[in-house]
DNA sequence: CCGGGCTAGTTCTAGACAGCATGTC
DNA sequence: CTAGAACTAGCCCGG
């Protein structure tokens, strides 16, 4: 079937007008892999695994499957690996709304209501969200006729892979006619994935735009076609020379490095290169963007980023606030920012193609190995895949950097010539099975051990392993764990039944081990728990990512641990049990960060104190909110007291305020800063705000008339009109000195797209 | 007295999903 | 069992 040319017009079964639409977009003849997918029956409901390079038209393959399925009266689901990609895909699919195709999105933070999605023809969601919807018995899931799994090679990921794997297995069990389309990067064993999904494999290395791969050593860039290119460099470092070389060809570059600090340092250095390649108009635009970056957050990271961006360079990593990220990504796409130095976040995230991709660091610290470990071939190839913008760049170029002749050879062997490693299921690990076995039993996919095992037979793991018994052994351990914690009951005949608590845990979507830890901690509490105690409790569950303990931290937090020992829920591990104690301290560090946030400490003080970025605060807060909600529900389920204390701790962390501001901070348009200012002039509650003297309110809000009016309206004041009202000078002065800031900025974390 | 440039020693390490009920500037 | 870039402190040197 190779080399067959297929045109859009040849495809039957698309909704009315869609074929015409594609033609208007300039899509007539399909790319070869797309044609192969059509040959394989993608538009006739056949399952297909497409293993193709990035940017070679995977989206169209998915669209052909989903649109024809919808046209036959069906319903399609598109599973994305990242929340940020959900909105991107939604926007793409909304193109088809004019032909009567309704699109909906569901992720943890974006819209979502199970029933509301029932009327949509195409639903975009993360694999975790789909899993959650299935657990909660969303009815419309039964109506699905087509599911697309994007970046399906992520089943290899030990944290999130099993969820995708189990979710696909569940959807396929619900409907054995389900058309399954899996989109994958080029991997070593796409055939195994196709076998697993009973799909036809479309395996192609075809790219719409030429990609040259190479390794730079000294001044010579050795390319994979055997040619060499001279990269002149004076005193410049290799990376800077490559970036400058791209700039002379009016192209931009993406530099992948192995740590946040390296990304920031590299951006600072590269800014000195890019600054000489900006025209006056670009300089102006960049200055504006830099100002927006400074507005987004008042931290050192923010300033450093703004400084770099003003000169045409930027860094990108997970410590950035989400505003920062999108500003940088947009500016790069607009070709204003000429280079981004980034950690691997960018390789997996939203689309940011670039003329040249430079993989500067090919080794990364890995705690499990105890040192630097080489990146996976697949990972490096994903980075390479960002090179070249179809239709815009003449070609893409992906470059590694060698520091010796031996390394030059090694990099060619290891990454340029090498095939990616095979994708391996990570399901047979306790943490993964703990949560998925409970959910599988709780949502009725198995009510006996036999059924459970036969369900697990539908996973990729089962098709890959020849190690008999491993799954059974782990399953048995997990069942025992779940039974011991009263999430599950095992009957003599092998029957399995989730308890009320087990159902609750499954629905809350927390790791059963997190739930067990929370329950244990709450049961150990005699008095009303403090906020710190509760923050520590959730921070030490496996669902909260650990903060790194730096040198000196151990001492500092050990002291704090003894100082505040009475507040902790449950007993502290012995100081001599090294691992357990370290984890406990690390959780304490997280807990105190949350406490600082909920005590109105400024964002920049927190980032400095804990060595984190603004985006990390956001992440911790979000996770804490989620887990505290789970804690409150679990307490309710078990009739434990302290529900009110948990709720208060959650609200405090949500708004980032002390308890006296909880009432005010809940008002729309009032965040932690404004609530504090109002409080300082004697307005302590919503009731006060409804009655307060308008000039005092206006003064506390720095004379911002419009803001003040909308706040008064939001709090339900009858006469929010501020016409003719003058700001109370005393209130203004007092508020200004009290906060020491003059921009009136609300430090809000509630920034979702 | 100050600052630049060098070296040897020290420090520190990627990422990001989920509930629920509504709304930051 | 495994690394390495970037930062830091301390030093020398020249002006």
Image: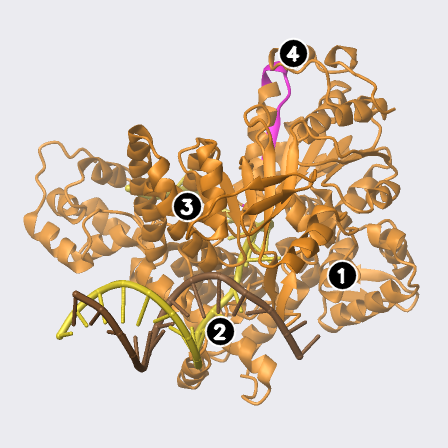
Chain colours: A orange, B yellow, C brown
- Residue at the disc numbered 1: A433
Q: Chain of mark 2?
A: A
Whether the residues at callouts 4 and 1 have beta carbons within 8 Å, the answer is no
The answer to which image quadrant residue A481 occupies is bottom right
Numbered circle sitting on residue A680: none
Q: Secondary structure at mark 3?
A: strand
A662 relative to A744 in the view: left or right:
right
Distance between the alpha carbons at the discs numbered 3 and 4: 38 Å
Q: State which quadrant residue A707 falls in.
A: top left
Q: Is residue A106 left or right of residue A245?
A: right
Residue tagged 4? A23
Q: Nearer the viewer, residue A242 or A614?
A: A242
Earlier sequence position, callout 4 versus callout 1? 4
What residue is pinned by disc 3? A314
User: What is the total number of numbered labels drawn onto the structure image?
Assistant: 4
Q: Which residues are magenta?
A: A97-108
> Is the residue under label 1 in contact with that under label 3 (CB below 8 Å)?
no
Q: Chain of mark 3?
A: A
Real-space CA distance between mark 3 and mark 2, rounded to the nearest whole angstrom: 28 Å
- Would you place residue A243 above or below residue A438 in this image? above
- Disc 3 or disc 2, which is closer to the eye? 3
- The first of marks 2 and 4 along the sequence is 4
Q: Are marks 3 and 2 on the same chain?
A: yes
Q: What residue is shown at x 91% (from left), y 63% (from top)? A: A467
Label 3 or label 1, whichever comes before in sequence order: 3
Q: Which residue is mark 2?
A: A549
Neighbour class for label 2 at 10 Å: few (<14), some, many (≥20)? some
């Amino acid at each position: 079937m190779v080399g067959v040319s297929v045109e859009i017009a040849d495809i039957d079964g698309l909704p009315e007008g869609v074929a015409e639409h594609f033609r208007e977009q300039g899509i007539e003849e399909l790319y070869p892999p797309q044609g192969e997918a059509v040959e394989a029956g993608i538009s006739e409901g056949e399952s297909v695994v497409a293993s193709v390079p990035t940017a070679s038209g995977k989206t169209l393959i998915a669209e052909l499957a989903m649109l024809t399925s919808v046209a036959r009266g069906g319903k399609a689901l598109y599973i994305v690996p990242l929340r940020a990609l959900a909105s991107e895909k939604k926007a793409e699919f909304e193109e088809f709304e004019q032909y009567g195709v309704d699109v909906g999105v569901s992720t943890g933070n974006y819209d979502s209501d199970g029933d509301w999605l029932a009327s949509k023809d195409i639903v975009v969601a993360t694999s975790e969200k789909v899993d959650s919807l299935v657990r909660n018995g969303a009815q419309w899931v039964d109506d699905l006729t087509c599911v697309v799994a994007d970046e399906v090679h992520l089943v290899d990921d030990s944290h999130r892979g099993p969820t995708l794997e189990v979710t696909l297995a569940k959807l396929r069990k619900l409907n054995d006619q389900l058309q399954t389309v899996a989109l994958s990067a080029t991997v070593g064993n796409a055939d195994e994935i196709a076998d697993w999904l009973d799909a036809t494999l479309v395996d192609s290395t075809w790219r719409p735009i030429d990609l040259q791969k190479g390794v730079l050593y000294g001044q010579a860039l050795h390319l994979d076609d055997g040619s060499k290119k001279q990269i002149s460099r004076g005193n410049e470092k290799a990376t800077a020379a490559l970036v400058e070389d791209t700039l002379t060809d009016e192209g931009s570059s993406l530099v992948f490095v192995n740590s946040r600090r390296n990304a920031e340092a590299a951006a600072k250095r590269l800014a000195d290169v890019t600054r000489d390649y900006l025209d006056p108009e670009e300089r102006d635009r960049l200055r504006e963007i830099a100002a927006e970056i400074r507005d987004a957050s008042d931290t050192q990271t923010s300033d450093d980023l703004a400084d770099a961006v003003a000169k045409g360079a930027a860094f990108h990593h997970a410590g950035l606030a989400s505003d920062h990220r999108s500003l940088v990504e947009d500016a790069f796409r607009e070709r204003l920012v000429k280079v981004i130095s980034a950690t691997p976040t960018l390789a997996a995230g939203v689309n940011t193609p670039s003329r040249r991709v430079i993989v500067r660091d090919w080794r990364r610290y890995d705690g499990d190995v105890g040192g630097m470990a080489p990146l996976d071939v697949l990972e490096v190839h994903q980075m390479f895949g960002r090179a070249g913008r179809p239709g815009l760049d003449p070609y893409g170029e992906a470059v590694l950097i060698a520091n010796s002749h031996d390394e030059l050879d090694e990099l060619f062997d290891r990454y340029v010539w090498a095939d990616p490693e095979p994708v391996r299921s990570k399901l047979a690990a306790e943490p993964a099975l703990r949560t998925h076995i409970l959910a599988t039993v709780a949502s009725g996919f198995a009510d006996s051990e036999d059924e459970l095992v036969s369900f697990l037979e539908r996973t990729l793991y089962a098709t890959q392993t020849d190690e008999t018994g491993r799954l059974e052994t782990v399953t048995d351990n997990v069942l025992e764990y779940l039974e011991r914690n009263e999430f599950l009951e095992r009957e003599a005949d092998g029957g399995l039944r989730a308890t009320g608590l087990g159902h609750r845990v499954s629905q809350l979507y927390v790791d059963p081990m997190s739930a067990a830890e929370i329950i244990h901690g709450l049961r150990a509490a005699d008095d009303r728990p403090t906020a710190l105690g509760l923050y520590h409790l959730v921070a030490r569950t496996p669902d909260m990512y650990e903060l790194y303990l730096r040198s000196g931290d151990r001492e500092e937090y050990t002291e704090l641990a003894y100082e505040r020992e009475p507040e902790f829920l449950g007993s502290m591990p012995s100081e001599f049990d090294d691992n357990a104690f370290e984890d406990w301290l690390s959780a304490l560090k997280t807990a105190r960060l949350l406490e600082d946030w909920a005590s109105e400490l400024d964002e920049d003080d927190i980032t400095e104190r804990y060595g984190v970025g603004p985006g990390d605060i956001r992440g911790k807060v979000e996770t804490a909110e989620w887990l505290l909600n789970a804690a409150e529900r679990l307490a309710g389920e078990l009739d434990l007291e302290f529900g009110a204390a948990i709720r208060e701790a959650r609200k405090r962390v949500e708004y980032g305020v002390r308890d006296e501001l909880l009432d005010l901070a809940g008002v729309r348009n009032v965040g932690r800063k404004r609530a504090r200012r109002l409080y300082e002039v004697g307005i302590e509650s919503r009731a006060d705000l409804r009655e307060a003297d308008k000039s005092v309110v206006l003064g506390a809000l720095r004379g911002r008339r419009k803001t003040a009016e909308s706040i008064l309206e939001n709090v339900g004041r009858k006469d929010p009109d501020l016409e003719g009202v003058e700001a109370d000078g005393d209130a203004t002065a007092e508020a200004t000195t009290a906060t020491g800031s003059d921009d009136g900025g609300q430090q809000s974390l509630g920034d979702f797209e």
